[in-house]
Amino acid sequence: MVNRIAGATFAERLGFENGQIVQEFGWDDDVDEALREDVEGAVGSGLEDVDYDGVVDAVVLWWREGDGDLTDDCVDALTNLGDKGFILVLVPKSGHPDHVDASDIAEAAQTAGLKASSSTKAGKDWIATKLVQGGIQKQR
């Protein structure tokens, strides 16, 4: 069941809109499938995988402590991202062994030329941070 607040789903409140193309990075069997379905419902299609090479409107990036270098993954996510696009970084909630601190996300975003614009609880076990373009300098 999709949660609605003031008539909008979680995905819609974050800026996902019908017709957008969304690429997904970091999928694993621990992701929140209801959240994925919410995004797919908002955009009206499935999420594209890491091999997609067209321009995308948004990126969903599932990231956990130990997944490597978050800055590198942010830069990779920028590869196909359109000029007005955004990246939604999803990390395990506080207290989870794979949790990533908000300051680490902000630092990686800034280094990649992005800006952390908002964070919110996403589902039962995840925290979402929306990264927008317009940080220090967009890298491509």
Image (cartoon, rainbow, N blue to C red):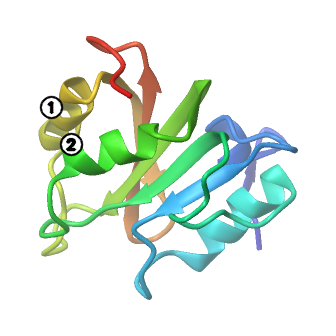
Total numbered circles: 2
Where is residue 116 drawn, in percent x and y?
34, 28
Residue plotted at (50% across, 64% down): 50
Find out whether the residues at labels 2 and 1 contact each other: C-beta distance under 8 Å: yes
Say what secondary structure mark 1 lies in: helix
Pick the residue in front: 76 or 62: 76
Q: Amino acid at mark 2?
A: Thr
Element carrying mark 2: helix
Q: Relative to the observer, which residue lies in front, 40 or 97?
A: 40
Left or right, residue 96 beside residue 92: left
Q: Amino acid at mark 1?
A: Glu
Residue on which the image places disc 1: 107
The quadrant of the image that shows the C terminus is: top left
The answer to whether 84 is drawn above or below residue 67 in the figure is above
Distance (Cα) linking label 2 and label 1: 8 Å
Give coordinates of residue 55: x percent, y percent: 66, 40
Q: Quadrant of residue 37?
A: bottom right
Regarding residue 43, the answer to whether it shows in the image is yes
Q: Residue at x 22, y 41 (%)?
A: 105
Q: Residue 92, percent across and down?
A: 30, 66
What residue did someone put label 2 on? 71
Which residue corresponds to the image point at 43% horizontal and 52% vertical from the top-left? 121
Direction bottom: furthest residue: 29
